[in-house]
Image (spheres, coloured by chain):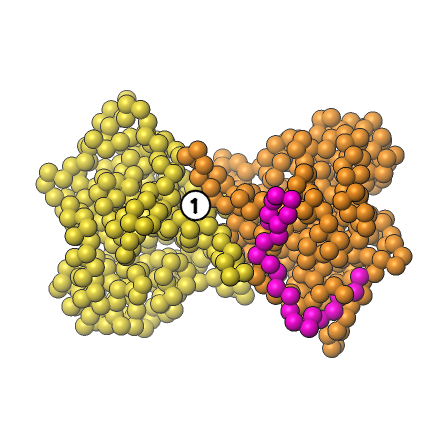
Chain colours: A orange, B yellow
Amino acid sequence: MPTPSTITLPAPADFHVHVRQGAMSELVTPHVAQGGMRTAYVMPNLVPPLTRTDDVLAYQRTLEALAPDVEWLMTLYLHPEVTPDEIRKAAKAGVRGVKSYPRGVTTNSASGIEDYGVYYPVFKAMEEEGMVLNLHGEVPSDDEKNISVLNAEKHFLGHLRQLAADFPALRIVLEHATTAEAVDCVLSLGPNVACTITAHHLWLTIDTVAPQPHHFCKPLAKEPRDRRALQAAVSSGSPKFFLGSDSAPHPTASKMPSVTGGELHACAAGCYTSPYLLPLVATLLEGFGALDRLQGFVSDHGRKFYNIPAAEKAEVTLRRPATPFRVPATLAGFGTEVVPFWAGRELAWEIV
Amino acid sequence: MPTPSTITLPAPADFHVHVRQGAMSELVTPHVAQGGMRTAYVMPNLVPPLTRTDDVLAYQRTLEALAPDVEWLMTLYLHPEVTPDEIRKAAKAGVRGVKSYPRGVTTNSASGIEDYGVYYPVFKAMEEEGMVLNLHGEVPSDDEKNISVLNAEKHFLGHLRQLAADFPALRIVLEHATTAEAVDCVLSLGPNVACTITAHHLWLTIDTVAPQPHHFCKPLAKEPRDRRALQAAVSSGSPKFFLGSDSAPHPTASKMPSVTGGELHACAAGCYTSPYLLPLVATLLEGFGALDRLQGFVSDHGRKFYNIPAAEKAEVTLRRPATPFRVPATLAGFGTEVVPFWAGRELAWEIV
């Protein structure tokens, strides 16, 4: 099949994105549309986390003011403050889902959960209200049990299976899968379980993560076999898999191994893909022979799972650039700065 | 057993250290003695690599001028230029060993080897001359074969077993082991095979490496079970295991994820432990209950394997510091600067 020179997609959507607060939010929120997305499903791990409907709605208004051309879909942060009553209130207000962070595993997850059992009444209410449960699928590291960032996702899959069995009518998304085992697990579960895949995990492995803080993210990219499984999930065209970029900007300084006050500081976790997301995803899918799955991955599958129809006249068209576009070294503004994923590399597609 | 308040050790030795060239060498070479080492076994991965006896001897004279109070033991870099004749010349000149780097796996290894078979005449000559073969025990990453920095050492162990079987009188050191499988393999082989263990691999796991370029080294620190196996190897008191710090300084800038010329640059691999090596090792061994194995690990086992007796009156004494010493954030001089391992952390022991 000859490669097309243009591709038109119905209203691409990013079903997992971080657009932050304050100056960083002012810089990055407009990048979502720039990257070709018409709909964005927004993560609630602000400081403090968004545990109340009113705060979620205030955040939504802020994002709408910063980027009125994007449909902002909002989430609550699973936390003891999120009661079944709060779920019903949130659902009525149009909040779409609840994000669960196991405690301490990623950026701003110190308020994350330790035990799912106590949240069963909340999940029941979500099931009744048609809200989606979004799972950061890692358990905390534990030296005694030999649980590390390498196998934290595999150890989580038991929780996913249990939740899917206990709440068969609750829609559940395993977010940003990174392992062959996670892909297999999602495929083995019913139609209420889906899975987002990031752009960066379709390209990185541990070999390119270990020496490069700008590739450090949670969950960590793993072995070549795992990347192959993620690519195969996309190539299969299964509607269970769709784009959730987990685009997660951090100020450049937070990615540096600084030694301040005499202490070594760890680098922040996250890859920033929003500004070039659709051209990047097209370039990556073409790279492993799955360009024909682009529309399903970025437009159809996620919208169908979430029941978020594409707006009319919201198509986005990609074309071959006359000269390949090189991702810049930094994006700056509002007194902050972030290094985008693939800085210095060329994209094979551009948005018309 | 009550913890002693002082410990006197016969001539501690570091059987794997990088002391570099130029300004960096001027800065770090004196740190070897400062860290409590009387003998240092020096790696040959300079630019260009040390493949000729004359160059090794010139390097040794440079090191002796920079730090005359250390016994500098020298190595050749395994390379097509290293012939059996060169081995005999090197042995006569007092060169102790030959270091093998699989191609491309670590700092300055672009000249590394791809196939051991072609070096069998060299190994035969080394066996006859009593030279030691030092192995960087990783195979190159290979996406197709699912070989990554995570399992590169495990995949190397077949080479180690083969070499040990084919050259039963050749002393072989598996350098800087990082996995439980490597420890088991070394234990299963004859007395001609030994293994160095670094200070940093007794403390790091992948969880603390992934977010921190100053913890990024090759081989990568791996899972908690692997660290436990390394600690157990030290705790066992087996003479097969001894200190080889792999202390590997890089200028601070090389540890930064720089974006120059529009391209992202990976961080350099290596942890720098020389300046505080003996206090650090004592602190670490005490941390996992193996302080009684300190003398074997830092003085006796390596010297016995290499047949390098401790000089008289070369004892080093450690004591509890009145106030714990905090590792500084940086060490600078000669126009360069390096961040030491454990920057900002306290050491439980100091050299008298």
Residue A132 in the image, given as x and y percentages of width and height:
79, 41
- Write the residue at 71% across / 26% down: A80
From the top left corner, tell me how far across and down residue B260 is, in percent. 50, 58
Question: Does the magenta run of residues contain B184?
Answer: no
Name the amino acid, label 1: His
Q: Which residues are magenta?
A: A316-338
Can residue B325 be seen? yes
Give the percent coordinates (x, y) of residue A81.
73, 26
Residue at horizontal 81%, vertical 40%? A96
Q: Position of B116 compared to A87: left or right?
A: left
The quarter of the rendered structure image containing the C terminus of chain B is top left
Question: Is residue B282 placed above or below B177 in the rendered structure?
Answer: above
Report if residue A128 is visible in the image.
no
Q: In the rendered view of the protein, which quadrant contains the N terminus of chain B?
A: top left
Mark 1, residue position: B215
Quadrant position of residue B311:
top left
Left or right of B132: which side holds B211? right
Residue at point 36% right, 41% down? B330
Residue A337 shown in magenta: yes
Which one is in front, A155 or B216?
B216
Residue A275 appears at what percent x and percent y? 68, 55
Kindly identify which chain the residue marked by label 1 belongs to. B
